[in-house]
């Protein structure tokens, strides 16, 4: 089955999701108070770590890279990894100071040309991007002070493989931010690999031996598909600390 995350349509939607201004995303609905709190999701989730500087950060399922850029504000080194080669190519182009023109679909064949650029105040020497499989990460990645994985788990064919690797990826005392909308779909994950009960209880059962759960909360996000169609979703966000 073709990877939908290699399509021009999804690339444009994610560039808008990560780098679009409020007006670019919402258009004439920019004042809609039901949508406004869902903006800036890639920035908000990357800010859920404790304050202060950290040495190494890892952004799994980084898509087109906005959370990776934001993590680099407080991490001396950040690696962004995604399965989509087109997403990583776009993120790396932005890291090198380029801009990306893309089309925001309005309806039918009508679109608006927009430009994505990396956020200001970023040191690109702190960041690297690479394609990779979150279920089969390269063995020499090492360990990290901060690991971020937003809206990734329920898009993996076998998410358990990532959970099993997390204790090795997060340094003792390090932090893990997981966000998932819990939208388990057969097209991504075979039903036999879905949690038996709630996603939250599954995460607690699988991670509690190696991590302490610091907090849990709902984080809204909105993805614009057309001028009249928006995906409005609540992602379950959990923050964990690796046990000593």
Image: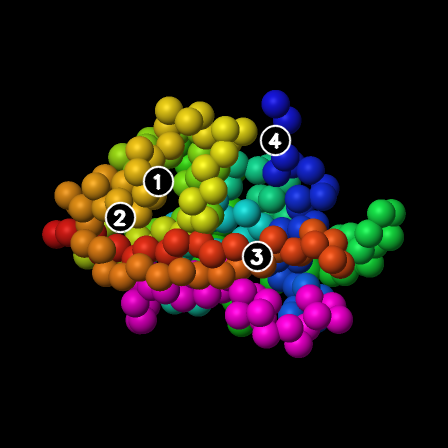
The alpha-carbon separation of the residues under discs 1 and 3 comes to: 34 Å
Instruction: State which region is magenta.
Output: 26-55
- Dot in front, 2 or 3: 3
- Residue 241 appears in which quarter of the rendering? bottom left
Per the image, the residue denoted by label 1 is 141
**Sooner in the amino-acid sequence: mark 1 or mark 3:** 1
Task: Judge the density around disc 3: few (<14), some (14-19), many (≥20) Cα neighbours within 10 Å.
Answer: some
**Sooner in the amino-acid sequence: mark 2 or mark 3:** 2
* Element at label 2: strand
Q: Position of residue 190 (x, y in %)?
A: 44, 25
Whether residue 98 can be seen here: no
Task: Judge the density around disc 1: few (<14), some (14-19), many (≥20) Cα neighbours within 10 Å.
Answer: few
**Which quadrant of the figure contains the N terminus?**
top right
Give the residue drawn at x 72%, y 43%.
9
**Which of these two is toward me, 149 or 98?**
149
Per the image, the residue denoted by label 4 is 3
Q: Position of residue 13 (x, y in %)?
A: 67, 51
**Sooner in the amino-acid sequence: mark 2 or mark 1:** 1
Q: Give residue 232's mark.
A: 3
* Element at label 1: loop
**Sooner in the amino-acid sequence: mark 1 or mark 4:** 4
Per the image, the residue denoted by label 2 is 170
């Amino acid at each position: 089955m073709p990877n939908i995350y290699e399509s021009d349509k999804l690339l444009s939607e994610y560039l808008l999701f990560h780098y679009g201004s409020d007006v670019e995303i919402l258009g004439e609905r920019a004042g809609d108070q039901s949508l406004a709190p869902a903006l800036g999701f890639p920035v908000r989730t990357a800010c859920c770590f404790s304050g202060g500087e950290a040495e190494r950060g890892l952004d799994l399922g980084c898509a087109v890279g906005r959370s990776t850029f934001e993590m680099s504000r407080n991490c001396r080194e950040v690696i962004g990894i995604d399965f989509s080669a087109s997403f990583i190519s776009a993120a790396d182009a932005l890291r090198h100071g380029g801009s990306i023109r893309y089309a925001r679909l309005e309806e039918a064949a009508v679109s608006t040309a927009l430009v994505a650029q990396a956020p200001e105040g970023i040191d690109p020497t702190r960041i690297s991007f690479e394609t990779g499989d979150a279920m089969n990460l390269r063995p020499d990645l090492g360990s990290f002070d901060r690991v971020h994985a937003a809206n990734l788990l329920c898009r993996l064919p076998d998410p358990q493989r990532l959970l099993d690797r997390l204790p090795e990826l997060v340094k003792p005392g390090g932090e893990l931010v997981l966000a998932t909308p819990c939208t388990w779909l057969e097209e991504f994950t075979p039903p036999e690999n879905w949690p038996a009960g709630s996603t939250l209880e599954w995460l607690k059962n699988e991670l509690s031996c190696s991590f302490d759960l610091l907090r849990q909360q709902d984080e809204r996000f909105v993805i614009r598909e057309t001028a009249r169609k928006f995906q409005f979703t609540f992602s379950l966000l959990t923050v964990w600390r690796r046990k000593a």
